[in-house]
Image: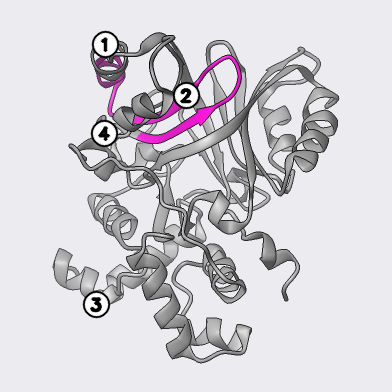
């Protein structure tokens, strides 16, 4: 089972070595079925899962707890960072200078409070890192002190986000979404909503009564607010896992330059509807759009990039980055640090 060596400051750390199934973890068909169900609904009851799979509830409870304790999965909230108070976000492509290895460098970078996601990649960049900030001043400070001047970094290229169009943490759903890819909504959350999200980001299955006791409100109020946020798709409560656990052996990022005379937003919206695509963001910099995708194999990657993306009207140029190692941490609402 996955042990402490695979956890970096609370990050879900998912390696993608050739020929491995889920890093060091051997998963059974029951495990895979559980992960799929918890990705669709991270709070689904053990009793409901038991009925669906025809497996004793005691077995379901034990195995889910083992998957959580060993950090194979993390059940958390997923939301547009802007909803959680982060008005500025960016993807940063970094290259190492050879003074230290890429893995130790990335593991030091993911210690930063502003970092929620990082991957080691092949191609133009040795790594991609997502940072979430309160404002542009904070972004400048983070880039200058923690990237440009960080030991081991030869270069850092910043791609500030202009609009997050799509995020889909459920790998199976991303494969066959047809015409249902849509832009991410940005409803507002009040202080109580954000404190609830903060509690559930650490443990998406935390009982509503426990959340209510922590915040000084009733269980029914917590339930009502969570139900509303889920219905409005402001948040999702899902199991985050290594894509390899469900048979998606390759994760990629694609940088896209849009042809003059074509709208970035129109192309970004088209990209959200492509199978395998899990993340679409419009940005400033060398590329106009970055796309993340999880694919079953190299043939699936070829299909996506060569047949589906490069043939789209408005695509001037693409650049493919293959992911070798992944770090993910649940995003805490900004208020959670100041309201306690």
Q: Does residue 215 lie above or below 74 as drawn?
A: below
Which residue was labeled with disc 1?
311
Distance, label 3 to label 2, CA atoms, is 43 Å
Q: Is residue 329 above or below residue 219?
A: above
Q: Is residue 48 left or right of residue 330?
A: left
Which one is closest to the eye, mark 4 or mark 3? 4
**Location of residue 336 (image quadrant):** bottom right
- Secondary structure beneath disc 1? loop
Give the CA separation, mark 4 to mark 2: 15 Å
What is the crowding at mark 1: few (fewer than 14 residues within 10 Å), some, or many (at least 20)? few
Extreme front residue here? 261
**Residue extent of the magenta highlight:** 278-303
- Sequence-wise first label, 1 or 4: 4
Is label 4 in contact with label 3 (beta carbons under 8 Å)?
A: no
- Secondary element under disc 2, as helix, strand or loop, is strand
Q: Earlier in the sequence, mark 4 or mark 2?
A: 4
Residue 172 vs 158, above or below: the answer is below
Q: Is residue 327 above or below residue 42?
A: above
Residue 288 in the magenta stretch? The answer is: yes
Residue under numbered circle 2: 289
Q: Quadrant of residue 228?
A: bottom left
Determine which residue is flagged by label 3.
47
Residue bearing the label numbered 4: 273
């Amino acid at each position: 089972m996955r042990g402490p060596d695979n956890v970096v400051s609370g990050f879900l750390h998912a390696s993608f070595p050739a020929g491995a199934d889920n890093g060091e973890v051997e998963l059974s068909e029951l495990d895979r079925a559980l992960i799929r169900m918890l990705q669709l609904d991270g709070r689904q009851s053990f009793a409901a899962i038991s009925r669906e799979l025809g497996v004793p509830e005691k077995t379901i409870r034990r195995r889910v707890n083992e998957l959580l304790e060993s950090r194979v999965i993390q059940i958390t909230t997923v939301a547009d960072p802007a909803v959680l108070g982060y008005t500025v976000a960016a993807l940063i492509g970094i290259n190492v200078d050879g003074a230290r290895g890429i893995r130790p460098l990335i593991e030091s970078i993911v210690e930063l409070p502003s970092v929620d996601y990082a991957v080691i990649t092949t191609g133009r960049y040795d790594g991609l890192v997502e940072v979430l900030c309160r404002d542009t001043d904070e972004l400048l400070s983070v880039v200058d002190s923690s990237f440009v001047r960080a030991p081991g970094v030869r270069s850092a290229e910043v791609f500030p986000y202009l609009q997050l169009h799509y995020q889909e943490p459920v790998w199976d759903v991303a494969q066959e979404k047809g015409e249902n890819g849509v832009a991410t909504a940005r409803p507002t959350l009040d202080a109580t909503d954000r404190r609830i999200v903060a509690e559930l980001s650490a443990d998406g299955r935390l009982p509503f009564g426990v959340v209510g006791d922590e915040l000084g409100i009733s269980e029914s109020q917590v339930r009502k607010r969570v139900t509303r946020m889920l219905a409005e798709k402001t948040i999702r409560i899902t199991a985050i896992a290594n894509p390899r656990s469900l048979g998606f052996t390759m994760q990629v990022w694609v940088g896209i330059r849009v042809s003059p005379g074509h709208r970035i937003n129109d192309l970004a919206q088209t990209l959200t509807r492509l199978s395998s695509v899990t993340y679409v963001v419009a940005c400033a910099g060398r590329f106009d759009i970055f796309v993340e995708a999880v694919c079953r194999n190299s043939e699936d990657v070829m299909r996506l990039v060569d047949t589906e993306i490069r043939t789209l009207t408005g695509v001037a140029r693409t650049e493919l980055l293959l992911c070798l190692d992944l770090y993910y941490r649940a995003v805490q609402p900004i208020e959670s640090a100041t309201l306690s």
